[in-house]
Amino acid sequence: MKGVFITGTDTGVGKTLCAAALLEVYRQQGFSTIAMKPVASGCEQTSDGLRNEDALLLMQHMCEAASYEEVNPYTFEPAMAPHLAATRENVTINCDELVVQAQSLADRADRIVIEGAGGWLAPLNEQQSFANLAEQLDLPVVLVVGIRLGCLNHALLTIENMQHRGVKVAGWIANIGLDNAADCLDINENINSLQTRISAPLLGKIPYQNDKDILKIASFLEI
């Protein structure tokens, strides 16, 4: 399996935008691509069933065809942590099944981009988290850091846990494009602080954009 697993320092830090942009980067490099959003909560009921906007965005930017259910196997309507949404619907998220599904998708393309939900240690079931799933997938991990107050602690704790688990960190992305990034008065200083403390490369700095143009975001990334 070749590609990356995208995680973040928290929910709402721009993982999906960066994942879609990475799909475009791979496409520009001449690779065929496919994506997966293993678990999604906060989905909307449509005529086609429950749909998640993050998964739909990834599908728009991948090259190879796959059904919605293949891209997003676990879909929950309540906007809450995935394991809580699953419990509410009497569902147990099975990591082994997700790995099999990911491999099936990866076999169809040169590169797969898999996006987690929430942060690195967000629970999936009573015993496992997205970190466990990433370990099983054995893909390099890209960490999206939302540059805002508290990001230093969140980013460094996440990287420390990845290193403790022996996970390969492909790099990290500094997302300055958050609505509350202005609250962080020392944006460049925060990024520099992280660069001196994270051995993995900084893959890009995403500036604020009103239009959230995926191709523009891709232009800021190097992978």
Image (cartoon, rainbow, N blue to C red):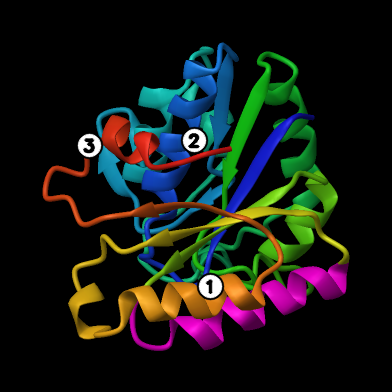
Residue 22 badge: 2
Whether residue 144 is in magenta: the answer is no
Q: How crowded is mark 1: few (under 14 residues within 10 Å), some or many (20 or more)?
A: some
Give residue 212's quadrant in the image. top left
Give residue 122's quadrant in the image. bottom right
Q: Position of residue 111 (x, y in %)?
A: 65, 24
- The answer to whether any part of residue 52 appears in the image is no
Tell me the quarter of the image containing the C terminus.
top right
- Label 2 sits on a secondary structure element that is helix
Residue type at tag 3: Asp
Residue assigned mark 1? 84
Q: Main secondary structure of the magenta part?
A: helix
For the magenta stretch, what is the residue range? 148-165
- Label 1 sits on a secondary structure element that is helix
* C-alpha span from label 1 to label 2: 29 Å
Q: In this view, does 148 lie to the left or right of 34?
A: left
Residue assigned mark 3? 213
| Residue at point 54%, 82% (across, down) | 154
Tell me the quarter of the image containing the N terminus.
top right
| Residue at point 49%, 71% (across, down) | 81
Q: Residues within 10 Å of mark 3 (few under 14, many from 20)?
A: few
* C-alpha span from label 3 to label 1: 32 Å
| Residue at point 53%, 73% (across, down) | 84
